[in-house]
Image (cartoon, rainbow, N blue to C red):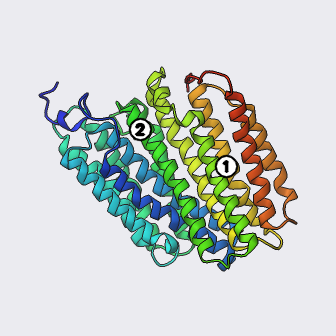
Amino acid sequence: MADQPGEQFLRGEKTSPRATFLELFFDVAFVFALTRLSNRLVDDFTVQRRLFLPEAGQTLLLLLALWMVWSLTTWTTSRYDPDQPALQLVVAGSMFGSMVMAVSLPEAFDTRGLSFAIGFVAVQVGRPLVLTVVMRHHPERHIAGRILAWSLVSAVPWIAGGLAENDARGVLWTLAVLLDYGAGRLGWPLPGRGRSPASSWTVTQEHLAERYQQFIIIALGEMILISGFTFSGSEFAGAQWVAFAITFATTALLWRIYFYRAGTVLGEAVAGSAQPGRLAESATYTHLVMVAGIVASAVGYEIVIAHPGGHTDPAWLTVIIGGPALFVLGRARFEYEVFGRVSRSRLVGLGVLVAMAPLMTRLPPLAVAGATSTVVAGIALADARRARGRPPERPSPPSL
């Protein structure tokens, strides 16, 4: 097996399970991309005053495209040896394509739709194309080949959408995203060739878990970056100081909730699972939900720092309260994936956040943020109280 052509491109026992410096460099593009995504939504909320639902839908489409690029690149480096020059070329090329997407993000549904689509398609087609070539003599070459085939199919609505205008772009890109995610969930099926779901791949669990942890840090770092830029450009009024402090506290609380304890033992949970590939694949979508919650939170707290007083626009509640609520929802699912249970504090906290939203419209944004942060702090305190005096809980993943 060791002498089989193409075998050197797969991860082996001698390959370090840790993320490489090139992968961390690749992540820098997504710090910038998430910042552009947040700024786009803030601008829609506070400057353009556009309708919320269409703009939120567009932002979600762009986030799904970014996550598809990052997650598939991460799965690639968890399966293939990232020290191989061909794989390094894939990662570097994916980084450049991600930067093209990021610089196009603010106007992706206006004048820069084609450049965003080209950046996405170049990564999604280029990655499996390189892998198909280097693995052409290996029995597992079909995995990259089937992904390439489906990427070429979805490239049609992506490019067509980039050329289209107005609502047609949204419709075509929605179709493209459904094709990309649907094909992945179905295992990129081909007529007469069956399927190859990601859950059946041989990947390095420790590496994959570390990469998920690192992206959560990236998202939280984007929240710090956005709040810092907003506050530094403000008048430094007393209310803005309080808003800035609440934002930092909430960011730290989200970090604490994620890493205690499921985020810390994810690699161990995947390794000990009866279905490691399925758990790792499920965690991909769970982390997408948590990242979306963090991005929405960053938008909400940027608004709070810039506009701490006055009445709260009902649309603002969807990010000031909805962002942390979405994160808690994803974190509850994540806890189930790792431990096979969900803490009562998660469910109670989520229920309180949802229930209090209609009552907050007459309060200033600063008060809404303070109330939201208090609920998040309650979840973190409940975690600490439950763990006091007890040995660390070991992972016990269920059958998914």
Note whether 179 is above or below 6 in the view shown. Answer: below
Mark 2, residue position: 208
Residue 396 position, x and y percent, is: 56, 22
Q: Secondary structure at mark 1?
A: helix
- What amino acid type is highlighted by mark number 1? Leu
- Residue drawn at x 70%, y 49% is 325
Q: Point out which mark residue 326 bears.
A: 1
Q: Nearer the viewer, residue 83 or 125?
A: 83
Note whether 389 is above or below 159 in the view shown. Answer: above
Q: Point out which mark residue 240 bears.
A: none
Q: Is residue 271 left or right of residue 253?
A: left
- Residue drawn at x 40%, y 33% is 206
Residue 12 position, x and y percent, is: 25, 30
Residue 2 found in image quarter:
top left
Label 1 Cα crowd, 10 Å radius (few <14 / some 14-19 / many 20+) = many
Note whether 221 is above or below 303 in the view shown. Answer: above
